[in-house]
Image (cartoon, coloured by chain):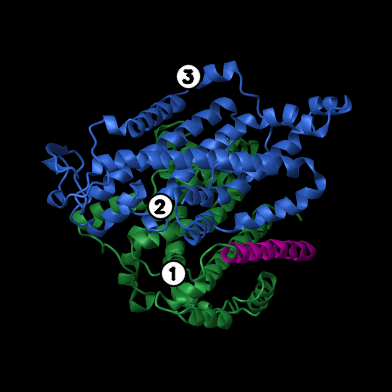
Chain colours: A green, B blue
Amino acid sequence: MFNFLARRLLSTLPVLLIVSLLVFLMLRLTPGDPAAVLAGDAASTEQIALIRTSLGLDRSIPEQFFIWFGHLLTGDLGQSYYYKTEVTTLIGQRLEPTVSLALVTITLAVLIAVPLGVMAAWRFGGWLDKGLMAFSVLGFSVPVFVSAYLLIWLVSLKLGWLPVQGYKRLADGFGPFIRHLILPSITLSVIYIALIARVTRASVSEALTEDYVRTARAKGLPEWRVLVWHALANAAVPIVTVIGIGLALLIGGVVVTESVYAIPGLGRLTVDAVLARDFPTIQGVILLFSVFYVLINLAIDLAYLALDPRIRY
Amino acid sequence: MDPALTELDAERAIPAPAVGPTAWRRLGKNWSVRIGGTVLALLLLASLAAPLLGTIDPSLIDPVNRDLLPGATGEVMLLTGETFPYKFWLGTDSYGRDIYSRVLYGGRVSLVVGVTVALLSLFFGVLIGLAAGTIRWLDGVVMRVMDGLMAIPGILLAIALVALWRASIWTVIVAITIPEIPRVVRLVRSLVLSIREEPYVEAARALGTPTLALMLRHILPNTLAPLIVQGTYICASAILVEAILSFLGVGLPTDVPTWGNIMAEGRLQFQEFPHNVLFPGIFLALTVLAVNMLGDGLRDTLDPRFAKRGDRP
């Protein structure tokens, strides 16, 4: 067990190293001089050169990488060219909206999708099952910004039930906080409901054909207990995997959703940083998301151990 | 099997039967293929034949006809000074440009990007995947780089890439292709690894077939069916990502009519004129839905055991 943990943790290191190399190279080898962007249109060549030296952009590419990577190891992501503050501070400020949105979304998706999937598997081929499959194809196809505008139009403009856009911090009170998060979370959760419900349906319907389910029914257990204790529990591994993958994929959706609903989170920060050619910020955010992705995969592997006693590493 | 579920054990993917005449016959009978194919053909035809379908110049700015509601009639004045009456079926935007014409012309960009990205990522994915699957010393290095690329959220990678180059149709295509390649590589590699163990490959090798011929003649044809399916899903995802890039303002220049650009401009006055956002959004959702249905149908007919979904924001 301990050996497995150690090996599994070590195996993430090369991936993280490659990610940081890719992120670094991608941004350094592209045309566009950040020094010139920073200096503005009116700057002279000397001023641009001065900025370039002060940022270390005049060194060779490998040198720049090692300097950057050394800072990275100490948790220093550098200073934003655009906001003139530490990237870590910047990320810290934008973390709350994104994390809240992601957590509310995934909670909503799991609460809706898992029961739906179980019901669909229970009445395999029935109307609920067919409806769920149709909904999931639709969920995969309607882009989040299309469904977002449809929801805003209906719920906020026509019915006036919820605020159109914006974000309220949790510190400002739970009521306004959750009211501002309802629409973005519903928008974002559609695709995850589709994804999780499909996997739940497939794996529960497979578990329902097992002998132990027949035995459980034969000994007279109530149907809900058969479904939850025998079918769902044994179908948990793929479901947990897909929830984990969903969490990792959530990041992509967050970028667009934050933009539509004017939420000042990490997604918005990325887009703004890209438009301003703010290298350190882009690198920092992409690295953060990639590390998160790697950690989620680690967590999924660990969850297998807890969920399926047959799995031993 | 469920698509999302089988994605999880793509490593164990089983080679599919090659595409042959019976496969074509089965395709014609599948309802997903019929509906998706028909809708897609209609959309393709409409965007190609846009000049013949009663459209006007999609970039024609006309201050007199600003912000018209769908169905309004007005006088269009061409740059030559010529005027004629025109019915704005889907209304106009805040520059007086005809939404109907812009949406039809916008379809060209989406379809070109979708198809090109699918072809390019299949081409490079097959190339790298075949190499990794057959050449042993290359395998480790290539797959670690692919793992690294996959850890970076695809949409963030695309946003960063496209914004750091100058946005044009080619940079958009390349930026969307790069995050898709690792997924194809993994698929091809896993297919190659399992096909390699087949008796017919062993027989061919025993007969002294050179490695290159072995790859091209015996292994590649058997990866075709899963690759066609994968290609349609990539196409759907590429159309979505292109729209997202345009919508976020980092995609094609705003003077090019794309669905994302039309929506990005329309969002500023969404409250008064929701049609500017909703019409291109509906077309976008319809196109992606059609491609996805086509993909599902292809998957079910060409190879029921194989399925793979790309990440969709």
Q: Which mark is residue B29?
A: 3
Classify the position of the C terminus of chain A by image quarter: bottom right
Could you give the CA–CA distance between mark 1 and mark 2, rounded to whole angstroms? 17 Å
Element assignment for label 3: helix
Q: Which mark is residue B251?
A: none
- Residue type at mark 2: give it: Leu
Estimate how packed mark 1 is, as few (under 14), some (14 to 19) or many (20 or more) residues with alpha carbons within 10 Å.
some
Q: Quadrant of residue B41?
A: top left
Q: Which mark is residue A276?
A: 1
Residue at horizontal 70 percent and vertical 31 percent from the top: B220
- Residue type at mark 3: give it: Lys
For discs 3 and 2, the disc positioned in front in the rendered view: 2
Q: Are discs 3 and 2 located on one and the same chain?
A: yes
Q: Position of residue A231 (x, y in %)?
A: 57, 43
| Residue sitting nearer the eye, B149 or B198 | B149
Q: Earlier in the sequence, mark 3 or mark 2?
A: 3
Residues shaded magenta: A1-28
- Residue type at mark 1: give it: Ala
Image mark 3: chain: B
**Res. B219 visible in picture:** yes
Image mark 1: chain: A
Image mark 2: chain: B
Could you give the CA–CA distance between mark 3 and mark 2, rounded to whole angstroms? 39 Å
Residue A2 magenta-highlighted: yes
Estimate how packed mark 2 is, as few (under 14), some (14 to 19) or many (20 or more) residues with alpha carbons within 10 Å.
many
Estimate how packed mark 3 is, as few (under 14), some (14 to 19) or many (20 or more) residues with alpha carbons within 10 Å.
few
